[in-house]
């Protein structure tokens, strides 16, 4: 049980890996004060909300993660998908453009941007 308190993010990742999303969400919420400035924590929480079909809440956490570490392509990719789910085309296009600046070889972002701009 000591590991749970010594490495709370590791426990959070394990809950997610095990598919215990609701439990992960509750546990994650209990860590908010300790990890308010941790981009990895914010990414994990956003991912949990995304998995639980709360794209709006996921974007809040992805934005917090990107405010701390603004060059994370994985976070931008999930944020793009959340915007698409919410039918927020312009925001999704903006995310794709940011991904392409950070990772010009990201063909998925190029293809998605082309598709979004043609609709």
Image: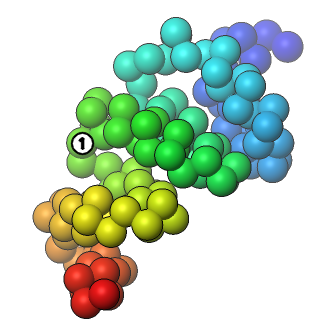
Question: Residue drawn 81% across and 49% down?
Answer: 19
Question: Residue drawn 35% across and 55% down?
Answer: 76
Looking at the picture, how far across and down is residue 5, in whole percent? Answer: 71, 11
Neighbour tally class for label 1: few under 14, some 14-19, many 20 plus, Cα within 10 Å: some
Residue 68 is left or right of residue 58, and the answer is: left
Can residue 29 be seen in the rendering of this structure?
A: yes
Most extreme residue toward the left is: 101
Which quadrant would residue 3 be assigned to in this image?
top right
Residue 62 is left or right of residue 47, and the answer is: left
24 relative to 55, above or below: above
Looking at the picture, how far across and down is residue 115, in whole percent? Answer: 32, 87
| Image mark count | 1
**Which residue was labeled with disc 1?**
70
Residue 24 is left or right of residue 82, and the answer is: right
The quadrant in which the N terminus is found is top right
Q: What is the image's colouring? A: rainbow
Which quadrant would residue 44 be assigned to in this image?
top right
52 and 98: which one is in front?
52
The quadrant in which the C terminus is found is bottom left
Can residue 74 be seen in the rendering of this structure?
A: no
Looking at the picture, how far across and down is residue 62, in whole percent? Answer: 41, 42
Query: Dot 1 lies on which element?
Result: loop
Which quadrant would residue 67 be assigned to in this image?
top left
68 and 62: which one is in front?
62
């Amino acid at each position: 049980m000591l590991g749970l308190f010594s490495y709370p993010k590791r426990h959070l990742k394990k809950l997610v890996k095990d598919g215990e999303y609701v439990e992960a969400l509750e546990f994650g919420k209990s860590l908010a004060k300790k990890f308010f400035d941790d981009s990895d924590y914010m990414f994990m929480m956003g991912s949990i909300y995304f998995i639980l079909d709360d794209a709006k809440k996921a974007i809040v956490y992805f934005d917090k993660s990107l405010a701390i570490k603004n060059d994370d392509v994985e976070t931008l990719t999930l944020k793009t998908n959340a915007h698409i789910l919410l039918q927020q085309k312009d925001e999704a296009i903006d995310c794709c453009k940011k991904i392409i600046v950070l990772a010009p070889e990201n063909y998925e972002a190029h293809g998605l941007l082309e598709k979004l701009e043609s609709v």
